[in-house]
């Protein structure tokens, strides 16, 4: 059965934590930048939710999902970038 390659959910969580804890505090004094970072956080949360819906559709359709941890990961094999 063919698998649908998707980013591992932890990738979204890592980026969101970075933006919320470090980036947001770095732009705390600039309202325009704070707004842009907040919009980016909202967009990433929507993307994570959309991926979750896609995974649920795949599960209901018996279509396997392969969470990828890197671009060099292919199923059970790791590709060496030479």
Image: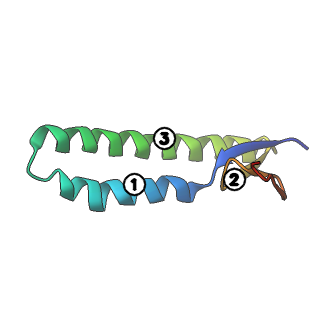
Residue at the disc numbered 1: 16
- Front-most of residues 32 and 3: 32
Marks 3 and 2, Cα distance to the nearest angstrom? 15 Å
Label 1, residues with CA under 10 Å away: few <14, some 14-19, many ≥20: some
- Quadrant location of the N terminus? top right
Q: Residue furthest right?
A: 1
Q: Nearer the viewer, mark 1 or mark 3?
A: 1
Q: Secondary structure at mark 1?
A: helix
Between discs 3 and 2, the one toward the N terminus: 3
Residue at the disc numbered 3: 47
Between discs 1 and 2, the one toward the N terminus: 1
- Front-most of residues 24 and 72: 72
For the point 27% across and 54% down, the residue is: 23
Q: Is residue 47 left or right of residue 36?
A: right
Label 2, residues with CA under 10 Å away: few <14, some 14-19, many ≥20: some
In the image, residue 64 lies at what x, y percent? 80, 47
For the point 75% across and 49% down, the residue is: 81
Marks 1 and 2, Cα distance to the nearest angstrom? 18 Å
- Front-most of residues 42 and 59: 42
Residue at the disc numbered 2: 67
In the image, residue 50 lies at what x, y percent? 53, 40
In the image, residue 19 lies at what x, y percent? 33, 53
């Amino acid at each position: 059965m063919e698998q649908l390659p998707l980013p591992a959910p932890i990738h979204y969580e890592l980026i969101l934590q970075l933006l919320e804890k470090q980036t947001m505090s770095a732009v705390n004094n600039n309202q325009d930048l704070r707004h842009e970072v907040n919009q980016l956080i909202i967009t990433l949360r929507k993307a994570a939710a959309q991926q979750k819906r896609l995974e649920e559709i795949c599960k209901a359709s018996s279509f396997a999902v392969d969470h990828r941890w890197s671009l060099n990961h292919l199923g059970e094999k790791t590709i060496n970038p030479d």
